[in-house]
Amino acid sequence: MISAVLAALCWAQPPIAQPPRLRATLPNGIGILVERMPEARQISVHLLATSPLTFENSKTHGLRHLLEHLMARGPEGDLDARLERKGLLLLAETTRDVLSFEITGDPKELDLALESVRQLMSPPRLTAEMILGEIEIMAEELALEPQNSKLASAAWQQAYGGQMPDPLGSLSVMRKASPEALAALHQALFQEGNRVISISGPFALQPTMDKVRGLLEGLRKPLNQPFDAALVPFQPGTLTVPLSGAARGAGVPPLSARETLYSIAFALAVAQTDPGVEVLYTPSLRSGLVVLTAASSPRLDEAIDGLTEDQVASLYPLGQSLALGWLRGATQDASRNAKIRGLLMLIRRPLRLEDLIQSLEGMTLDDFKTARERFLRDRAVRVNG
């Protein structure tokens, strides 16, 4: 009788909940985050790399962007086509801190996605002809840069000078690039830099983690020091440029900082109440800039400087809701989830997306008012077209 009762109790116990994600740092320094999202329709595999040795200056401006384009072609020049035939898509991005690649698509092709990431981390085979051919393609891309992006770039130039140049780069600098220089840049990023693989999708956690370990454990350990997220001094001021429109930028620390999240909340609230205002923010590991753009400077002056205390207070719950929606939405989308979690691992390995959400949930009205002050005309960067 007793044994029968015990058996019934054991049967009634709920199953042990599996952890939603696994994370690890390999002996070679590569960070891995694997998150199971059973409801997701696609997988997302992000490769992110950064190194203080690759931060750009006037002599290297655009080399990381050029490397991104060349790497995306793969060792045989046909990586994107091979992936597309299997239901996968390759995306790449260069920011002021990070070079990143994402492979997203059919969950059944996870092994191919992981192997492709491994190939991206291997030294590329480059020639002078390949480099020049790619630069011509990039020249067309640069010519199509949106107006608000150009305004934001001008704001960055005013805010940080040449210390954090536009990641799109200079064609004149890129045309001088040699295969050897780009190979050294690749090594600094993907063999010696701070590297993270962040994966989200409908797969089994431990087997996926084991696969990633098996692919990456043989890579070398970084020789340089860990990533140093030292802030670059922010310089407010006004810049007049030969562009149409205007921009207002608030200097902020990395994405992980509360004041950055609060500034994003204020910017989103302003943009929500004025359809003519847009927000541009690229998550950063170092100093950053939250930029608002509009058709004219007076429009931004009214939207920011002209707010009364009561209006700021009314924007507070809206901004908090919009910013929380941005972050919480990332927890439901495999691509955004993998990207943001990967960026946070680059900043500090234990940092979690939930930590950012908790910071925003605790934002007070005074925090929101302080965030608004960063955008005021005497404290921000102003760009007049």
Image (spheres, rainbow, N blue to C red):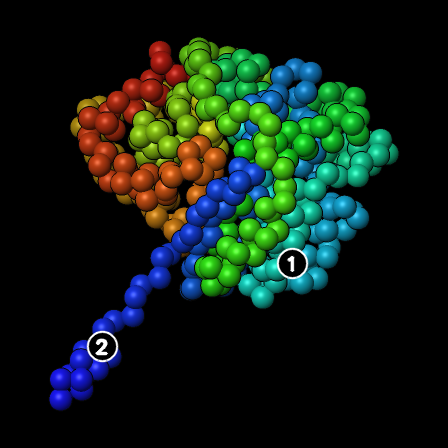
| Residue type highlighted by circle 1 | Leu
Where residue 141 appears, as percent x and y from the top left, is 69, 35
Secondary structure of the residue carrying numbered label 1: helix
Instruction: Estimate how packed mark 1 is, as few (under 14), some (14 to 19) or many (20 or more) residues with alpha carbons within 10 Å.
Output: some
| Residue type highlighted by circle 2 | Cys
Q: Nearer the viewer, mark 1 or mark 2?
A: 2
Quadrant of the snapshot with the N terminus: bottom left
25 to the left or right of 320 = right
Give the farthest residue toward the bottom: 1
Label 2, on which residue?
10
State the residue in front, 27 or 200. 27
198 to the left or right of 77 = left
Q: Residue at x 25, y 28 (%)?
A: 368
User: Could you tell me if residue 382 is visible in this image?
Assistant: no
State the residue in front, 138 or 246. 138
User: Could you tell me if residue 357 is visible in this image?
Assistant: yes
**Residue 68 lies in what quarter of the image?**
top right
**Residue 270 lies in what quarter of the image?**
top left
Closer to the N terminus: mark 1 or mark 2? 2
Vertical side of 328 occupied by 160: above or below: above
317 to the left or right of 159 = left
Instruction: Estimate how packed mark 2 is, as few (under 14), some (14 to 19) or many (20 or more) residues with alpha carbons within 10 Å.
Output: few
Label 1, on which residue?
112
Q: Residue 51, labelled with which disc?
A: none
Gap between marks 1 and 2 measured at Cα? 41 Å
Where residue 254 appears, as percent x and y from the top left, is 41, 28
